[in-house]
Every structure is written in C-alpha cells, then in structure tokens.
Amino acid sequence: MLHVAVPNPIHKVKHLKLLFFSHGGLVPPLHQRSPSSLTHQKLAMAKQFIPLSSSILVAVISLFLVSTFVPGVGSIGVNYGTVANNLPPPPQVAHFLLESTVINRVKLYDANPDILKAFAHTGIAVTVTVPNDQIPRLTKLNFARQWVEDNVQPYTPATNIVRILVGNEVITTADKMLIGNLVPAMQTLHTALVAASLDRRIQVSTPHSLGVLSNSSPPSSGKFRLGYDIHVLKPLLSFLRATKSPFMINPYPFFGCSPDTLDYALFRPNAGVLDENTGLLYTNMLDAQLDAVFSAMKVLGFDDLEIVIAETGWPSMGDSTQVGVDANVASEYNGNLKRHVSSGAGTPLMPNRTFETYIFALFNEDLKPGPISERNFGLFQPDMTPVYDIGILRPTVTSTTHLLNFNVTYQYTHIDMLQYQYCYTQFSFP
Ligand SMILES: *[C@@H]1O[C@H](CO)[C@@H](O)[C@H](O)[C@H]1NC(C)=O
Ligand SMILES: *[C@@H]1O[C@H](CO)[C@@H](O)[C@H](O)[C@H]1NC(C)=O
C-alpha cells in the first residue's frame, strides 16, 4: 500500500477531560470509544461517597481515574497519509491526536515540514520517510547530510522524530536501481545521523510488503525471494542488527482473505490452520503472516531482530464484489488487532511478544486511486469524526449525579499519568 507512524506506549495522557453533570444517574459517554464498563462501575461506586463531602468526592474520583485509566490507556500508531484534498491542517490533527486519542505514534510517507512542526512538543513519536525516488541520491554522503540538515535537524528534538524510513516497499517495486541502492542509502543516512549526533535518537529502517516472501505457507516455510535474500535482505538485516533497528513489514490479512477465511482474518473464533511442520495451530491470519516473515529471517540467521508492523488495516467501504467490507468489520479487525498485538500473547513462533503497530490509516484519503476500498481505510473522516470506534479515543466521562442538589462540573486537565498529578479547572456549585 502506498501511504504514512510510531513506537510504544508510555501513556502520556496529557489532557483528560471529565465532566460530571447532574441529572440523576451516570450518562454513558456520548460518542466514544471504549470507556470500559468497569469504569462505569467504579464511577457508580464512587457516587456512594458523594454525600461525604465534595473534596472526598474529588479525591475518590481522581483515585478511580488513576486506577482505572492508567492500565486501560492503550497505545497504537497510525499512518498519517495525505493523499487527499480535504484533510484538516496539521496543527489541528496533532492537537486532536494528542488531546482526544491514545495514538502516540505517527508514521508519515514523507517529511512534510508543516506536519513535523505541528507535532512539536506533543511527545508523539514521529516516523518520517525518504520517498523512493530519492534513494539513489541518498547513497551520496553529501546528499544524506543535507537531507538530515533540511528535514530533521530543524524539527528535532521539539518534534520527537524517532525513525527515518528509506523508501516504502522498495523490493516489490522491482526497480533494480532502487533495490540495489536501498541498503547503501540506509547506511549513508545512518552515517549522516552519526555525524549530526542523532543516531542514538533516530533509527533507520524500511518497510516491506509481504511480496518480499517467495513462500509463506505454512508459516514455518517462510522464505525471502531468491536472489534478494542474499543480495539485499541479508545486508539489510545485518545493518538493522548493527544499529538496533527493527525489521518492518506491511501485512494485510484483508488482501489475503476470501469468504472462507474471513473469520480467520478477523481474529474471530475459527478452527484454525495447522502448520504440519511444527504442529503449531494458527488461529488468525496475522500470526501466520508474521511467522512466515520470522521464518524467512531465521533462514538467514536473523531471528533475533524486532519486527514492527508498519502498516495493516481494513477498509470500511468497498464495492459489491468485496466480502466483509463495512465499518463493523473494519472495526472488528482493527480492534482485535490492537488487542492482539499489545496483549503479549505474541505468535506461535514468537511467543510473549508485543508488536509496535501502525494502523493504515488515520484518515480516509479521497485522492487515492483504485477501488473504492482504497479510499476508505481511515479510522477518521477528514472532519475528524470517527468512522468507527476501536477504543482509541481518550476517556471522556460525562455523567450526572443528583445529590444534595449539587450541579458539579469538573473539568480535569493535565492529568500526568506518570506523576499522578491533576488539577481541575472548573468546579462549580450553581
Ligand atoms: C511465555 O509466557 C508463558 C506464560 O508466562 C511462559 O510459561 C512461557 O515460558 C513463555 N515463553 C517464552 C518463550 O518466553
Ligand atoms: C450544570 O452545570 C453545567 C455547567 O455550569 C451546565 O452546563 C448544565 O446545564 C447544568 N446542568 C443542570 C442539570 O443544571
């Protein structure tokens, strides 16, 4: 897929807003995302304490906030693609992601200066991309230094740039000029980062489509394409190991599934698929795809590297020939994906791992060519309304209590999850 990402969850909930209104009973949050029922139970319990005193109420509620929301705040990256003519200005997007979602990593398909500026002081981890057509020139150290000087140094460290990707799905372009220059370009870029003393802060990698594999089924027989394996992937993997950077892939069960395998692709209960070589049972297609990549890496002796899911997703709309394409199914895939990759379950060949993951995509992108589905991979519409909910909106609790005729409005802001500090900016007793 042509498109835009981030690493892991250090839950920086910067601004958590809570409003308690008074009309008897807890009003379920309006349009969100995943305030868990547990949260409601705890708030309902908190209600019993209200008559004691308002300060105890505040204390109790804040206690529940901390205890309930800290573990519940997940994190996920998104691809911020911009092939559209109707997207909001980058500062609005950055503000929205920070304030209203738990997304704490974004991946860009370029190094758009307006976007880099917009993410300054957000703490959100930003990955930028050197477009494919600049790869041959990037093998020249002068060009690489200039690229870092122009595209990275003006923005870091205010903008938390954590990784630079050299191209996107370069090997499956079949363009020999690009493929031959890929690893030298990555090495040269890394050298330029060393010269700028940015190599400890910023990694270099490149994402691959599953087309990089010649064999993926069963997962244990995964292999890289012959020729590329020795001449490109081996030096690439060596570079990644030497620089402690991850191998990045773009797995899409959506593109690998049929009506028969829809349950398997969506992480629904299903009979599973047995890998007869290993005796391992696969209960979802993503695990099978990840393990095929892992097996291919292992053949070359690189099973110790981290694997990052640079892109995956599911469209919420398609044409009539496509099965399983609607907002409910997209929500099911991305929601189950988010749970699975962060659960620590790992895969049959990589047990107990979590995977840094970037959903494709942040927005529906109206100028993307191809079938309808291509323009409908977004989690959000261009006006930032959610297409569906996978629990990435920040908890905004609106509830009401009718006690002692209070009308209590609390607005909590700046809840620092690490330091357990908060303040409330409104507290009114009309
Ligand atoms: C994975 O975790 C399980 C449960 O904690 C443990 O029994 C198992 O040994 C772990 N496996 C690996 C490979 O670490
Ligand atoms: C409670 O106060 C808030 C904020 O002052 C106000 O918007 C809301 O309408 C009030 N609710 C009731 C039931 O009085």
Image (cartoon, rainbow, N blue to C red):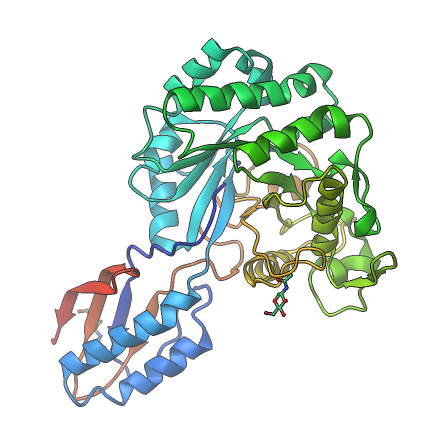
Quadrant the N terminus occupies: top right
Query: In the rendered image, which quarter is residue 46 located in?
Result: bottom left
Q: Residue furthest right?
A: 276
Q: Is residue 1 visible?
A: no
Residue at horizontal 86%, vertical 56%? Answer: 277
Report x, y in % for residue 64.
Answer: 31, 76
Residue at horizontal 44%, vertical 51%? Answer: 103
Residue 44 left/right relative to 232: left
Residue 181 left/right relative to 88: right
Q: Would you place residue 408 above or below residue 261 in this image?
A: below
Q: Would you place residue 116 above or below residue 329 in this image?
A: above
Q: Would you place residue 317 above or below residue 197 in this image?
A: below
Report x, y in % for residue 26.
Answer: 34, 80
Query: In the rendered image, which quarter is residue 208 located in?
Result: top right
Residue 426 left/right relative to 49: left
Residue at horizontal 80%, vertical 58%? Answer: 261
Residue at horizontal 14%, vertical 79%? Answer: 55
Report x, y in % for residue 230.
Answer: 76, 27
Residue 422 left/right relative to 293: left
